[in-house]
Structure formats: structure tokens, C-alpha cells
Image (tube, rainbow, N blue to C red):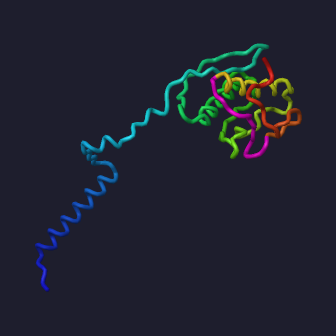
Amino acid sequence: MKFDKKFFIITSLITTLGGILCFALLEEWIIIKHPWWHAYEQKTPNAFSKHIASIFVWSNNQWINEKNNMIWAETNVIDNIKLLTQATLTFLFEEEITKKKVYVEAVMNTADNTDTLIMFDRNPFSKTMPTRQKLLIIESILKTIRENGIKAPKIRFLVNNQTLVDPHLDFSISWPLEGFFE
């Protein structure tokens, strides 16, 4: 059986063009919409919005309230808790209440959704810090989360995947979001 050169060229050309067309469709370089497809499209609202958050810090025997613009996740409370906690820690550092810059590594819920775990990259307290100041730092984080309308279960604080160890405060138990001060 003899095939001519023209047949191979045409077959190769059609196959190459078909492959390029399929690749362009899969990579969404070419978008084809039929009039009947729009009925099945799910329109998802924008999951993020601009939000003015209140950050609370205890300083000079009073609550200081700072307003921050944040990109607020409408459906993901965990991301919002992480943003608020990091903003509070940054504000504490800027006000020179904490001596070192502390970052929030992760925020997650426990499997049974009874606790929210907030994990720091280092211990936010210095060894010489008074117990009252440590308690007020924790209360600042809790008040910031609470006052921004987040309904969260109890909060547990971790450092590098381990329970935060402190000689004055017990972090092996969860802290209620309501805090301890009026």
C-alpha cells in the first residue's frame, strides 16, 4: 500500500492544528460560550471585601483602639482571625509593649471545632515581663477578635506546634473569647 507525500502533510497539519486548538481551549486562551451554557454557570459573589477592623491594645492604663483597613474574607473566619491577631501583634510591637516582632504562623480549628489554635513563630513574652502585662497582651488579642464580630470557640495559643510555655500563665487550657476584663 502506497501513501503519497501529500496525504502525510495534510494529516500532520490537521493533527497539529487540532492539538493546538485543544491545548488553547484547556488553557482557556480560547473561550467558547454557547447561549445555553449561561444557565448552568454559578455566579459566586466576591469572597473578599474591604473591612475597617478595630485593633485593641492595653497601654497606659487604658484601651487604645486603632482602625485598620483590611481585606476581609467573607466566608473564611480563620483567615480573619489570623489577620486580626497579626495586626494586634504588630500594634503591640509598634507601641513597644512587646520587645520582639512576633508572627502568626497558622490559625486552625480543632477537629471537633471546640477550639481555635493560633500558632506563633516565637514566644511573644519576654522572660522578665510581668504577669499582668502578659495577661493584658492575651486580652488584647481576644478583645480584638471579639470586637470585630467574630464568633469563635475558645482560643488556644501555640509556639512552633507546641503549647506556649510560660511560668506564670497556663496555656495548656483554652482561653475563652469573652476574656476576663470588662
Would you say residue 45 sits in the magenta stretch? no
Q: Is residue 53 visible?
A: yes
Which residue is at a point 71% across and 34% down the rendered structure image? 153
Would residue 119 be visible to someone looking at this image? no
Give x and y (percent) for residue 53: 59, 22
Tell me residue 82's x, y (percent). 63, 34
Q: From the viewer's perspective, tell me whether residue 108 is left or right of residue 24.
A: right
Residue pictured at 71% horizontal, 27% vertical: 141
Return the x and y of residue 63 as percentages of the image width and height.
Answer: 73, 15
Q: Is residue 127 left or right of residue 58?
A: right
Q: In percent of the image, x 22 and y 65: which residue is there?
A: 15
Outermost residue to the bottom:
1
Q: Nearer the viewer, residue 13 or 153?
A: 153
Occupied quadrant, residue 138: top right
**For this view, does 74 lie left or right of residue 125?**
left
Residue 64 screen position, x and y as percent: 70, 15
Numbered disc total: 0
Residue 20 quadrant: bottom left
Q: Quadrant of the N terminus?
A: bottom left
Q: Is residue 149 above or below residue 43?
A: above
Q: Which residues are magenta?
A: 148-163
Relative vertical location of residue 116 with respect to residue 1 in this rendering, above or below: above
Asked if residue 154 lies in the magenta stretch, the reply is yes
Q: Depth check: 127 or 57 in front?
A: 57
- Which part of the image, by quadrant, shows the C terminus? top right
